[in-house]
Image (cartoon, grey):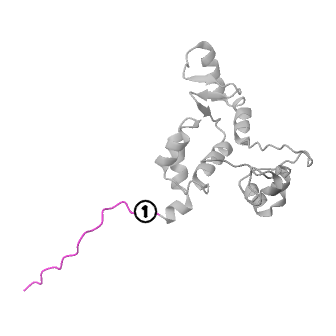
Amino acid sequence: MTINYHPDKANVVADALSRKNSCNLAYLITSQRKTLEDLDRTGIKIRVHQIRVKLANMVIQHSLLDEIKANQQNDAQLLKIKRDMEEGTRREFNIHKDGSLRFGTRVCVPNIPEIKKKILKEAHHSLYTMHPGSTKMYKDLKQIYWWNNMKKEIAIYVTECFTCQQVKAEHQRPAGLVHNLDIPM
């Protein structure tokens, strides 16, 4: 394989390496209505600081983690766990470098129904998950989050999902071949 460089006008076919990098990422994102609608639907907000910047970066942050960290300070159970950690009786918990309480690597979620509902809704109704069952959803969420009675709350959430109640897969073996019954004489 060889790479041939053709400067400016000799390069008839423009490619990514020969183009000038003068486009503005913020302008491209904010000028496309469909992209903005998609981002808005998923809860992503676009903030443009300066339009004339040649170098732009895009940072995607999840505000849910900030909300969890702020509410960890008000949860009685999590405060008790922190006190137990200081005494040395709860070694499986730790304080992450961002200041959040963790169970191993999992974020401890305070006992606030609105936060739990946001997590469960994102994990169950997202366009990428397509209504997983309670076992799959628990396995996915337990890698990231921790709270008491998590498995039970996930199972209740999935059983209350209207879409999941309407569309149920059959968990029975196929009946097999149909045989004619003998005619009684």
Give the residue at the far top of this rendering. 87
Residue 98 showing in the rendered view: yes
Taking depth in this image into account, of 5 and 85 the one nearest to the observer is 5
Task: Name the quadrant containing residue 125.
Answer: bottom right
* Residue 159 horizontal side relative to residue 96, left or right: left
Q: Identify the residue at horizontal 62%, vertical 33% (top origin).
A: 107
Give the residue at the far bottom of this rendering. 185
Check if residue 39 falls in the magenta segment: no
Find the magenta span and give its range. 168-185
Task: Name the quadrant containing residue 119.
Answer: top right
Q: Is residue 175 above or below residue 40?
A: below
Name the residue that disc number 1 marks: 169
- The percent position of residue 40, horizontal first and vertical second, equals 76, 56
Q: Identify the residue at horizontal 80%, vertical 63% (top origin).
A: 33
Indicate the amino acid at tag 1.
Ala
Residue 152 showing in the rendered view: no
- The percent position of residue 5, horizontal first and vertical second, equals 73, 49
- The percent position of residue 71, horizontal first and vertical second, equals 72, 34
Taking depth in this image into account, of 23 and 134 the one nearest to the observer is 23
Task: Determine crowd level at label 1: few under 14, some 14-19, many 20+ residues with C-alpha closer than 10 A.
Answer: few
Judged from the image, the secondary structure of the residue bearing numbered disc 1 is loop
Q: Identify the residue at horizontal 66%, vertical 47% (top origin).
A: 3
Q: Identify the residue at horizontal 80%, vertical 53% (top origin).
A: 19
- The percent position of residue 15, horizontal first and vertical second, equals 74, 55
Q: How many marks?
A: 1
- Mostly what secondary structure, the magenta segment? loop
The quarter of the rendered structure image containing the C terminus is bottom left
* Residue 112 horizontal side relative to residue 180, left or right: right
